[in-house]
């Protein structure tokens, strides 16, 4: 009855085709189209995919465990304003009739189940930053707006209106999907923007990030732009973060309350933050998952005067130079960049925070200094540790952190490490134009 009622509702909205969408290990949306009449099958059995064709599954090329089934979540059914006649359903991965342990959405479901057993839920407000680019005709990417050339372009009200049509269409598309868009601004790099929407349960927030990416990619292409969530496309400018505002809640409706409020809440918040700091090196592999990510997490300045990306494992009240920025009733986790898989980053954040709570870890003293203004010697004298400075270092930290690996599950951990080590090795062996210019005639 549920599927028939939903089918009737979607048909009344003009939907003829379903987009069965799942997310791979890299945080990339994948899927296929199904006629609306296949809704019942999508919800009950799922849409079938070749398992080994999906990055990070590790599934065989033959036998019963070679098929990946994306089973639709009826609560996510949503007609897509930018694709009239199409509706997206988010899918959970199943293999051989069981939840697939290496499906990123299933990983986050397991993490949320640990919270639910305590009567808790993590709510996140995820803030994606992104670039709008074009090619320059010589094989390089540049900002879509040729006039966007300020050294410090944050909140630029000359450049922002030039992209108003694209950004307005994106706003309306997301609003039409039920997202409450809070603000849109020009960020601190040329061609860089940020769009924020309201916070929600961690799983829903991750689903919304994937919806945002689908909408932004399609609408940017329509306007002749390339939508990019590459963490650091330009060496001399800030990169794109995807900051998480996080809070713990209990209860529903009129009985709900934030567990980080009040004096007792501050103690719980401290334990949670201490867990995040304690596991920060391993979390780095998931929150900054590419070679390029570590061009963002650097110590130093950019064209605008700051990178706005954390390099040090510290926390502080409203301190945007620290890894964790504390705010009333919540904290901002500033480590994730725009390439992070929102499901895996959320699951790992929950695991780290719960470890801090369970072990009653105490956070270090809050840092009220501008960490970007301190020398490495001053940082060391304060006992503040440095985040991994390469993907290779972050992968070693993840491998050494049994608790975070356990939260991800054995299959996904093995696949993540294997794929990311291959990425690192490819980068390490690549001979760049910079190397040729510096060394080809030097010796």
Image (cartoon, rainbow, N blue to C red):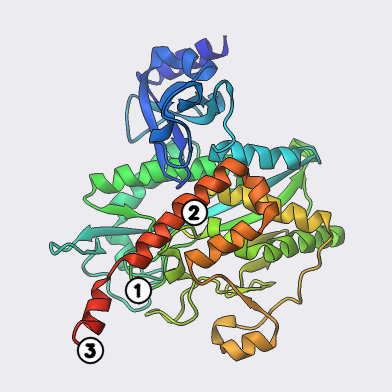
- Which element carries disc 2, helix, strand or loop? loop
- Mark-to-mark CA distance, 1 and 2: 19 Å
Residue that badge 1 annotates: 235
Q: Residues within 10 Å of mark 3 (few under 14, many from 20)?
A: few
Answer whether residue 338 is visible to the viewer in this image. Answer: no
- Mark-to-mark CA distance, 3 and 2: 39 Å
Tell me which residue sits at (60%, 83%) in the image: 370
- Which element carries disc 1, helix, strand or loop? loop
Where is residue 70? Give x, y as percent: 48, 27
Q: Earlier in the sequence, mark 1 or mark 2?
A: 1
CB atoms of marks 1 and 2 within 8 Å: no
- Mark-to-mark CA distance, 3 and 1: 24 Å
Tell me which residue sits at (37%, 20%) in the image: 34
Q: Earlier in the sequence, mark 3 or mark 2?
A: 2
Tell me which residue sits at (66%, 46%) in the image: 407
**Left or right: where 365 falls relative to 322:** right
Residue that badge 2 annotates: 340
Q: 412 or 39: nearer the eye?
A: 412
């Amino acid at each position: 009855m549920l599927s028939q009622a939903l089918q009737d509702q979607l048909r009344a909205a003009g939907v003829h085709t379903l987009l069965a969408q799942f997310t791979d290990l890299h945080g990339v949306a994948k899927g296929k189209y199904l006629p609306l009449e296949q809704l019942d099958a999508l919800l009950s059995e799922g849409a079938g995919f070749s398992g080994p064709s999906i990055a990070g599954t590790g599934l065989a090329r033959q036998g019963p465990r070679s098929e990946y089934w994306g089973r639709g979540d009826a609560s996510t059914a949503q007609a897509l304003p930018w694709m009239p006649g199409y509706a997206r359903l988010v899918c959970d991965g199943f293999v051989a009739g069981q939840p697939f342990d290496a499906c990123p959405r299933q990983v986050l479901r397991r993490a949320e189940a640990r919270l639910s057993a305590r009567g808790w839920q993590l709510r996140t407000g995820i803030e994606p930053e992104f670039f709008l680019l074009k090619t320059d005709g010589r094989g390089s990417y540049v900002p879509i707006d040729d006039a966007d050339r300020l050294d410090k372009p944050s909140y630029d009200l000359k450049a922002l209106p030039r992209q108003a049509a694209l950004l307005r269409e994106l706003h309306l598309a997301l609003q039409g999907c039920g997202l409450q868009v809070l603000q849109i601004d020009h960020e601190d790099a040329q061609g860089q923007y940020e769009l924020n929407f309201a916070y929600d349960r961690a799983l829903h927030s991750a689903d919304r990030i994937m919806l945002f990416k689908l909408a932004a990619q399609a609408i940017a292409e329509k306007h002749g732009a390339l939508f990019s969530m590459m963490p650091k496309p330009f060496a001399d400018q800030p990169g794109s973060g995807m900051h998480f505002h996080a809070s713990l809640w209990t209860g529903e409706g009129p009985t709900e309350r934030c567990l980080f409020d009040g004096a007792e809440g501050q103690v719980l918040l401290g334990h949670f933050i201490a867990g995040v700091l304690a596991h920060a090196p391993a979390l780095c592999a998931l929150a900054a998952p590419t070679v390029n990510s570590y061009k963002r997490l650097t110590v130093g300045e950019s064209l605008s005067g700051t990178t706005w990306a954390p390099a040090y494992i510290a926390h502080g009240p409203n301190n945007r130079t620290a890894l964790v920025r504390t705010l009333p009733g919540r904290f901002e986790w500033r480590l994730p960049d725009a390439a992070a898989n929102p499901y895996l980053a959320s699951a790992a954040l929950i695991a780290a925070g719960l470890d801090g709570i369970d072990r009653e870890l105490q956070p270090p003293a809050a840092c009220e200094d501008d960490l970007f203004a301190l020398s490495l010697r001053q940082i060391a004298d304060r006992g503040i540790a440095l985040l991994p400075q390469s993907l290779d270092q972050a992968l070693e930290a993840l491998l050494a952190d049994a608790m975070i690996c356990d939260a991800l599950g054995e299959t996904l951990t093995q696949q993540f490490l294997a794929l990311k080590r291959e990425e690192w090795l490819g980068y390490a062996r690549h001979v760049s134009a910079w190397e040729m210019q510096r060394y080809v005639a030097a010796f």
